[in-house]
Image: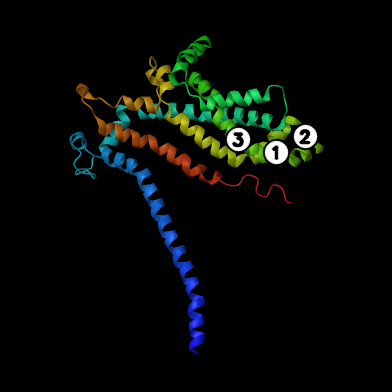
Amino acid sequence: MSTLQADTKITSSPASTIKSKALLSRVLLWIFLLLVAGFALFPIILAFFGSLKSNLELTTGTTLLPKEWKFENFTQAWTSANFARFTWNSMFISTFTTIGTLLIGTMAAYAVARVDFYGKRVYVVIQSCTLFISIGAVVLRPQFDLMVALNLQKSLWGVIIILISAHATAFFMLIGFVRAIPKELDEAAFIDGCNFYSVYFRVILPLLTPALGVTALWTFRGAWNEYILPLVFTMTQPALQTLTVGLAGLKYGVGDAAQPQLMLAGACLSMLPMIIVYIFANKSFMQMTAGSVKG
């Protein structure tokens, strides 16, 4: 009997060790994830509590939580910066930039992934150069001169066209998804009477729905946070300013006194549309071709 008990203890010991190691690894993983989430959320929490403080309390920076909650900062920021107009301008630019980028990006990805044409590699290299080589403000003057030639220097469409032209990131995100779609689906569509263009609209685009959601999320975010282009194109057109440009107007108030609490309140308000977009686009992160073809 004693020998049997000893054997049971010996055999159960490795199992308990494996369970303890699995539990320890899970605890360490949760600690790591909580630390990463804390570092990511801390600036947002700091900005939110700062937006509810008075100017004096914020500049002194004594405590994290406000001693007196100034919810009127949000109302003042909304009215002082003309947030309704600026939000509409930002939404206009971001929406049409996203639509245009998705349309051009999917067409380019479909053509490169499915067709062998002269200069294909050169085109991909040029796209790579625009993606990895950033020359920043150097191109602002040529871009502005181009929009002047098109008579779009005083319109938000000039900003939208320039932002759509920088679609290299969307192109490389989408081309991987297009290449993952089996070519057998194209061949089956051709047999059913589709041509090259109808395959794009009836086969490729429906299967790219999750990829379009992910790409739209990144494109919308980039257009929403764009600052330099709207600033350059709206210097003489204050009514066309976006939220990122309008927030700078909250820096100084009456008597040129700095008002950082209003800037923080405006920044918190400008985060809300992006949070809503992330919530609705979250379900797009899934496997694209799941169930499209059965082996």
The residue that label 1 is drawn on is 203
Instruction: Tell me which residue sits at (79%, 36%) in the image.
Output: 190
Find out whether the residues at labels 1 and 3 contact each other: C-beta distance under 8 Å: no
Name the N-terminal-most of marks 2 and 1: 2
5 to 19, vertically: above or below: below
- The spot of residue 86 in percent (x, y) is 39, 27
- The spot of residue 157 in percent (x, y) is 50, 20
- The spot of residue 70 in percent (x, y) is 23, 39
Work out which residue is located at the far bottom of the displayed protein and give it: 1
Front residue (pair 114, 66): 114
* Element carrying mark 1: helix
Work out which residue is located at the far top of the displayed protein and give it: 149
Name the N-terminal-most of marks 2 and 3: 3
Front residue (pair 37, 107): 37
Instruction: Tell me which residue sits at (40%, 52%) in the image.
Output: 32
Instruction: Tell me which residue sits at (47%, 44%) in the image.
Output: 279
Instruction: Tell me which residue sits at (44%, 59%) in the image.
Output: 25
Examine the rendering and report whether any part of residue 277 can be seen. Answer: yes
Find the distance from the CA under tag 1 to the CA under tag 3.
Answer: 15 Å
The residue that label 3 is drawn on is 174
Compared across the picture, whether 80 is left or right of 110 comes to: left
Examine the rendering and report whether any part of residue 164 can be seen. Answer: no
Find out whether the residues at labels 2 and 3 contact each other: C-beta distance under 8 Å: no
Find the distance from the CA under tag 2 to the CA under tag 1.
Answer: 10 Å
- The spot of residue 125 in percent (x, y) is 60, 25
The residue that label 2 is drawn on is 194
Find the distance from the CA under tag 2 to the CA under tag 3.
Answer: 22 Å
76 to 119, vertically: above or below: below
